[in-house]
Amino acid sequence: MNLELSAVWTRMQNLLQTFVVTIPNILIGLLVFLVFMGLARLARNAVTSLSQRAGQSKGIALVFSRIVSWLVLAVGVLVALTVIFPTLTAASLFGALGVSGVAIGFAFKDIFQNLLAGILILVTRPFRIGDQIVSGEHEGVVEDIQVRATLLRTYDNRRVVIPNSELYTNRVTVNTAYPQRRLSVTVGIGYGDDIAAARALILKTLGGLDGLLQDPAPSVLVRELGDFSVNLDVRFWIDPPVRREAVEAQDSVLEAIRGALPAAGFDLPFPTQQVLFHDQTEATDGNRAQQREGWPARQDNPESRLELQRKGNREATDAQPRSQVQHP
């Protein structure tokens, strides 16, 4: 028992002596890492300044400054490790990294894919920070383009994190790519109304609204002949093309048209349906041997409503008493 305790004590003394000897190396390694942290910050500021001078966007400057900063920090970590552990040489360290590089590549495939996609998005500039985009089911304002993902703030003030690879490979609609945007609303008028007069009235109404551009000018086209109305497609342009302006412009247009058309005698019809019975359409309706609705023909067909009505009329006529005619 005493021998076992003495062995444990000896081992603890050796560990303590090793730690005491390693303390100066740890302090020097931490100092080296702090120096590299300062160098990483200087490198990040330098890349940001160079990008701004070159006329690059804020997103490109941000991503490349982060990449350079991380590279400098990675070199600082390697140098600090070689200082703390003198037996760990740079050759052995890079050799170990080379052996595990394949495994790391497979493990972080998605991260590297998103990193490359983020760089390509910043270089090709399909959209920028501050643009309003639509990606799949999400729509909002681009707040930040990071190395791994893009941050999107929706109009109801929620944050959506979208991987850069998804944005780069899938379809993205940029609503603010151009200074002007065309919007449209659908308005239905009655079949008895004059389309040309309704078009002229709508264009006159849109000409008096604020926030709508007159160059390009608004237009009114017949969209379709609906079930209960003639649907007109009212098109107009706004500037700037942001979501708030679009919603407010559509609201003002619909409100103005809603007041102008009925005041001028135009109808805004409600959905209506017409239900006809068999005996209200054709003479053969109700006769399953002759009707055209797809009923199977049979020999013992019941009499149609029209036939029953005719028979009833004949029986009523026969039942009436004949008038007595007296001759002089």
Image (tube, rainbow, N blue to C red):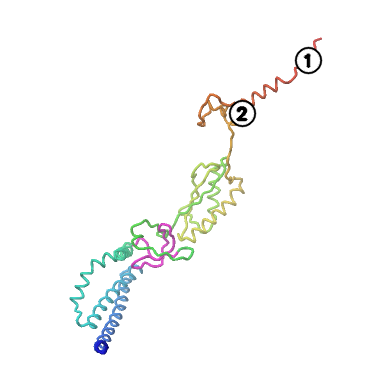
The residue that mark 2 highlights is 305
The residue that mark 1 highlights is 324
Taking 253 as reference, is 158 above or below it?
below
- Using residue 306 as the reference point, say whether residue 169 is left or right of it: left
* Viewer-proximal residue among 171 and 236: 171
**Could you tell me how far apart the alpha carbons at marks 1 and 2 are, in whole angstroms?**
35 Å
**Could you tell me which residue is drawn at 75 percent across and 17 percent down?**
322
Magenta residue span: 125-153
Taking 201 as reference, is 128 above or below it?
below
* Viewer-proximal residue among 183 and 320: 320
Q: Is residue 189 visible?
A: yes
Please name the amino acid that badge 2 sits on.
Arg
Q: Residue furthest left?
A: 91
142 falls in the magenta region: yes
Q: Residue furthest right?
A: 328
Q: Quadrant of the C terminus?
A: top right
Residue 195, quarter of the rendered image: top right
Q: Earlier in the sequence, mark 1 or mark 2?
A: 2
Nearer the camera: disc 1 or disc 2: 2
**Could you tell me which residue is drawn at 44 percent across and 62 percent down?**
140
Q: Is residue 20 visible?
A: no
Q: Secondary structure at mark 1?
A: loop
